[in-house]
């Protein structure tokens, strides 16, 4: 019962174009969502987050969109750069888990940005 | 320290042996998490500490797994009678308070049980 799903294992885009990474969730109690980036042999690095009271959060080249009715969120990277090539994980948490802040992760999407 | 530090980076052990994995969180962070990441999967929650106490250990797969954080800083994940299926990258993360703040991850310990 995968509560957070990233259905695209990989994505390849050209440098300068937009990268769109998608994430779906099933648990309607999730109220905080995050994106992490991971390079090989390193731990995940926080990228951007969004609370369920918002539908958009922007930070430089990165924007996260949340569609609660569809239980869907997406990460937009524009313009994409070769250094963005990494594995991207979507994660979610909910207050109902006893306010622990523990994260439920998706399987990850490998992004390759070609020069 | 500057970030979350995990030791060792790699650990190879024989089936049936006992292992300890160490995590040094960012100074001042009260919340500490252990996750396990298998190949091709996202990190999977194991246990959460708020201070010294394990506030949520619902992710520990069985009683061979145990974790401690005796002084509210360094944490040790202990695995008894290791099995080949325990092979994975074990990630530690810390955050200032837990809820609705991003967690900072260490580089992980790659455990291989042969």
Image (cartoon, rainbow, N blue to C red):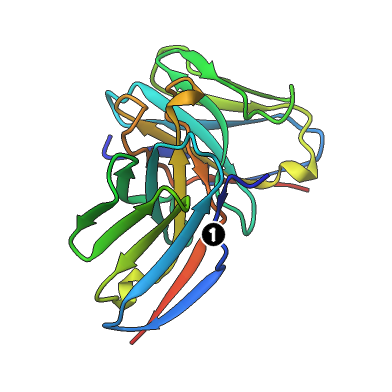
Q: Horizontal and vertical percent for residue B10? A: 57, 47
Q: Residue at x 40, y 36 (%)?
A: A31
Q: Horizontal and vertical percent for residue A80? A: 29, 75
Q: Secondary structure at mark 1?
A: loop
Q: Residue at x 39, y 44 (%)?
A: A33
- Left or right: where A88 falls relative to B79: left
Q: Residue at x 50, y 25 (%)?
A: A97
Of B25 and B44, the residue lying toward us = B44
| Vertical arrangement, residue B77 with respect to residue A40, above or below | above
Q: Quadrant of the N terminus of chain B?
A: top left
Q: Count the marks: how many?
A: 1
Q: Residue at x 78, y 41 (%)?
A: B14
Q: Horizontal and vertical percent for residue A48? A: 30, 51
- The reply to whether residue B111 is in sight is no
Quadrant of the rendered image containing residue B44: top right
- Left or right: where A76 falls relative to A58: right
Of A28 and B59, the residue lying toward us = A28
Of A111 and B81, the residue lying toward us = A111
Q: Looking at this view, name the residue that lies furthest to the left.
A: A60
Q: Which residue is mark 1?
A: A6
- Left or right: where A55 falls relative to B10: left
- The reply to whether residue B67 is in sight is yes
User: What's the chain of the residue with tag 1?
Assistant: A
| Vertical arrangement, residue A89 with respect to residue A112, above or below | above
Q: Horizontal and vertical percent for residue A34? A: 38, 47
Quadrant of the rendered image containing residue A13: bottom left
Mark 1: few/some/many CA within 10 Å (<14, 14-19, 20+): many
């Amino acid at each position: 019962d995968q509560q957070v799903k990233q259905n695209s294992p990989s994505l390849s885009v050209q440098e300068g174009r937009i990268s769109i990474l998608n994430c779906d969730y099933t648990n309607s109690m999730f109220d905080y969502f995050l994106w992490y980036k991971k390079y090989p042999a390193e731990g995940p690095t926080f990228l951007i987050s969004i609370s369920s009271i918002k539908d958009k959060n922007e930070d430089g080249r990165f924007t996260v969109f949340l569609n609660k009715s569809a239980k869907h969120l997406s990460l937009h990277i524009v313009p994409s750069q070769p250094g963005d090539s990494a594995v991207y994980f979507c994660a979610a948490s909910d207050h109902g888990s006893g306010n622990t802040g523990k994260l439920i992760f998706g399987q990850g999407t490998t992004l390759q940005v070609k020069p | 320290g500057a970030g979350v530090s995990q030791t060792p980076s790699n650990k190879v052990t024989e089936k049936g042996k006992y292992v300890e994995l160490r995590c040094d969180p960012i100074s001042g962070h009260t919340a500490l998490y252990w996750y396990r990441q298998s190949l091709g999967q996202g990190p999977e929650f194991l246990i959460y500490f708020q201070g010294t106490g394990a506030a949520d250990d619902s992710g520990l797969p069985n009683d061979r797994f145990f974790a401690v954080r005796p002084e509210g800083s360094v944490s040790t994940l202990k695995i008894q009678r290791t099995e080949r299926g325990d092979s994975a990258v074990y990630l530690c993360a810390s955050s200032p308070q837990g809820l609705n703040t991003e967690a900072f991850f260490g580089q992980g310990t790659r455990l291989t049980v042969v």
